[in-house]
Image (cartoon, rainbow, N blue to C red):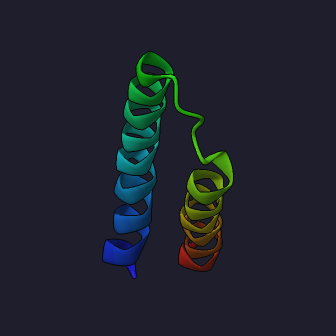
Amino acid sequence: MMFLWDGCYIGSSLWMAHWTQQASEDLVNGVETENFFYLAIYSVLSLSYGILAFLRS
């Protein structure tokens, strides 16, 4: 279970980095970022992280 917990933590951090990089590129190119898609994935990872942290204790 610890590996899943760490995976969600690392995954959410990597996803946030990817999201901000994509948003920056979209801003330069004049394209609107699909925030709902990125927010949905980030929410699932963060919620999973919270649930696994609760179960771990």
Up-down: is 32 above or below 38?
above
Query: Which of the 4 quarters of the picture holds residue 22?
Result: top left
Q: Residue furthest front?
A: 30
- Residue farthest top in this picture: 28
Q: Quadrant of the N terminus?
A: bottom left
Front-most of residues 54 and 27: 27
Viewer-proximal residue among 29 and 18:
29
Q: Where is residue 47? Give x, y as percent.
A: 65, 66
The answer to whether 23 is drawn above or below residue 39 in the figure is: above
How many circles with numbers are drawn on the protein?
0
Please tell me which residue is depicted at 38% across the width and 37% down the height of the picture. 17
Could you tell me which quadrant the C terminus lies in? bottom right
The x, y position of residue 27, in whole percent, is 50, 21
Q: Where residue 31 appears, x then y in whole percent?
A: 52, 32
In this view of the protein, which residue sits in the foreground, 14 or 38? 38
Left or right of residue 12, residue 51 in this image = right
Q: With 26 as the anchor, is 6 left or right in this view?
A: left
* x 53%, y 75%: residue: 56
Query: Does 1 appear above or below 8?
Result: below
Left or right of 8? Residue 3 is: left
**Could you tell me which residue is drawn at 60 percent across and 48 percent down?**
34
